[in-house]
């Protein structure tokens, strides 16, 4: 079961790369917005493909393939790069959307996206280095906040758009609102549960320096479905819908108000 799921992730990754290449070839004006979005999306799609090919569970130090590419540090570093690119994409998207719709609050909202995601990344690194799941709780809560803000912005924008752009706003509301809801109902409780079980087991946390060395050296190969099945929902959605949203933001200028 685990390997079938992994094969599916790899297939989705190939599809994503193909979609990005198609988006890059579409005849659109070579604006600064498009150039930045295309580059940022390319990094995000590439990193998602890498993480799909070499999946790991960071804090528990599980990996599917025992290679140097499966080190926890490598995966977390790549993920940080990709997620910051995605955050900048969202900020640029909101700013351009504000320009297209003349809704000033969208431009104001765009300013908050990147700082909140930076805090989420720091919280994630704290969790991965120290083995304290509370860092993941904070991280996921911040991501839920970002997604809820995006969904709210798109909802307000929906009334001021028409045609293709209105459809895009509806998709944005569903994807971002749904993701925020899933994070709040599934991911945050999962990490709280893991933190609670670690406390009951009286496991010790690592210092930052020791945790860094641990991410470079320690990993445990496993293909046990019981280990991976709790990671399947978020990884599958992250490496599919997340990439589609990233690629879609490249094409915003092609849509009329």
Image (cartoon, rainbow, N blue to C red):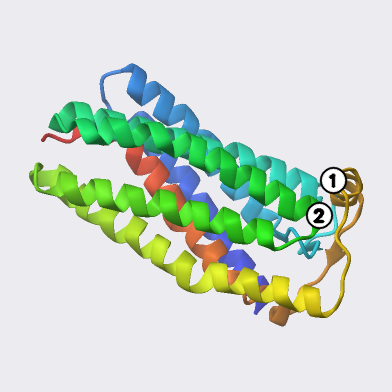
Q: Is residue 41 visible?
A: no
Against 225, residue 5 (above or below) is above
Q: CA distance from mark 2 to mark 1?
A: 6 Å
Against 119, residue 102 (above or below) is above
Say left or right for 19 vs 163: right
Against 159, residue 63 (above or below) is below
Residue name at image x 45 percent, y 44 percent: 18
Say left or right for 208 vs 11: right
Q: Position of residue 153 (x, y in %)?
A: 26, 46
The quadrant of the image that shows the C terminus is top left
**Which of 63 and 141 lies nearest the eye of the viewer?**
141
Against 219, residue 86 (above or below) is above
| SS at badge 2 | helix
Q: Position of residue 136 (x, y in %)?
A: 64, 58
Residue name at image x 41 percent, y 61 percent: 180
**Which of 163 and 108 lies nearest the eye of the viewer?**
108
The quadrant of the image that shows the N terminus is bottom right
Whether the residues at callouts 2 and 1 have beta carbons within 8 Å, the answer is yes
Residue that numbered label 2 is attached to: 130
| SS at badge 1 | helix
Residue that numbered label 1 is attached to: 208
Q: Position of residue 145 (x, y in %)?
A: 43, 53
Indicate which disc, 2 or 1, sits on the residue closer to the N terminus.
Answer: 2
Residue name at image x 35 percent, y 25 percent: 34
């Amino acid at each position: 079961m685990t390997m079938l799921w992994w094969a599916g992730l790899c297939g989705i990754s190939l599809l994503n790369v193909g979609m990005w290449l198609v988006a890059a070839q579409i005849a659109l004006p070579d604006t600064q917005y498009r150039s930045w979005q295309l580059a940022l999306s390319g990094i995000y799609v590439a990193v998602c493909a890498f993480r799909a090919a070499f999946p790991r569970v960071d804090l528990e130090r599980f990996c599917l393939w025992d290679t140097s590419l499966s080190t926890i540090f490598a995966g977390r570093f790549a993920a940080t790069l990709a997620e910051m690119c995605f955050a900048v994409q969202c900020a640029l998207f909101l700013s351009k959307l504000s320009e297209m719709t003349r809704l000033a609050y969208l431009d104001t909202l765009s300013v908050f996206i990147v700082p909140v995601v930076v805090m989420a990344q720091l919280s994630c690194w704290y969790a991965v280095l120290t083995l304290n799941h509370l860092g993941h709780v904070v991280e996921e809560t911040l991501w839920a906040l970002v997604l809820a803000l995006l969904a709210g912005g798109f909802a307000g924008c929906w009334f001021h758009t028409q045609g293709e752009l209105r459809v895009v706003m509806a998709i944005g509301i569903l994807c971002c609102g749904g993701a925020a809801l899933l994070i709040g109902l599934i991911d945050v409780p999962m990490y709280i549960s893991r933190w609670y079980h670690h406390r009951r087991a009286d496991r010790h946390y690592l210092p930052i320096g020791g945790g860094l060395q641990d991410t470079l050296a320690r990993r445990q190969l496993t293909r046990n479905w019981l280990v991976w099945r709790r990671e399947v929902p978020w990884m599958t959605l992250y490496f599919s819908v997340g990439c589609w949203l990233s690629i879609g933001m490249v094409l915003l200028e092609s849509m009329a108000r």
